[in-house]
Image (cartoon, grey):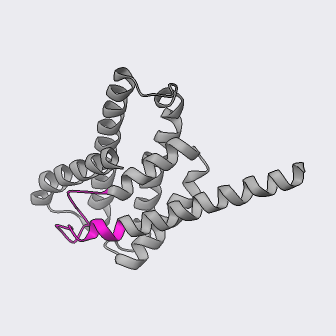
Amino acid sequence: MAQFLRQQLTLRIILIHLALFAGFILLSRLSSVFQLTELRSTPWNPETGLAVAAGLLLRYPAMISMAAAMFVSTRLWGWPLPGAWEYASLLVRTAIFVTSASAAAPLLLRHSVPTLQTLLVFLGFSAAVTAVYAVARLAVLWFSVGIEPSYLLPYTVTLSIGNLVGILTV
């Protein structure tokens, strides 16, 4: 009986990871409809919200399925960064969104019903994570493609708003 329950649990976990993987790919394609620049800047990034949700719910094991989904999504919709820089960007994105959500999960999920304090902490967490990612992504872009100064402010603002809206809508 215990063996059967373990197999059921393992199957359930695998199915959850596959659903997250497929959901990320679909949301990535959906958000690419709103793409503003060749650097994949969109005003809505629901796949980022899904990565944060996966980190909150599945904790650190979500890094594997989300990193794989980010990799496949990048392969399907193009390679805007040369060589290994896209992999560096993928690792940074996974680390910032999934890992930070995994680390913040005990704080954000401590009540069965969200309180005002939890909502405010989540808003602060979302804003901080999107700002950190914008700075990290700009650093990767600066080193990889020498992003032009005219891109800096519009790209950062669009990326941050898109990720924040994506986190809050998912």
Q: Is residue 75 above or below residue 85?
A: below
Q: Nearer the viewer, residue 62 or 117?
A: 117
Asked if residue 38 is among those painted magenta in the image, a careful observer would answer yes
Which residue is located at x 32 percent, y 65 percent?
A: 144
Which residue is located at x 24 percent, y 57 percent?
A: 44
Coordinates of residue 4 in the picture (x, y in percent): 85, 55
Residue 1 visible in rendering = yes
39 displayed left or right of 63: left
Coordinates of residue 56 in the picture (x, y in percent): 50, 41
Look at the image and give the residue range highlighted in magenta.
28-45
Coordinates of residue 96 in the picture (x, y in percent): 43, 46
State the image quarter where residue 116 is shown.
Answer: top left
23 displayed left or right of 154: right
Asked if residue 74 is among those painted magenta in the image, a careful observer would answer no
Residue 67 visible in rendering = no
65 displayed left or right of 88: right
Q: Main secondary structure of the magenta part?
A: loop
State the image quarter where residue 128 is shown.
Answer: top left
Q: Nearer the viewer, residue 46 or 90?
A: 46
Q: Is residue 116 above or below residue 92?
A: above
Q: Is residue 87 above or below residue 134?
A: below
Coordinates of residue 135 in the picture (x, y in percent): 29, 47
Which residue is located at x 73 percent, y 52 percent?
A: 9
Q: How many marks?
A: 0
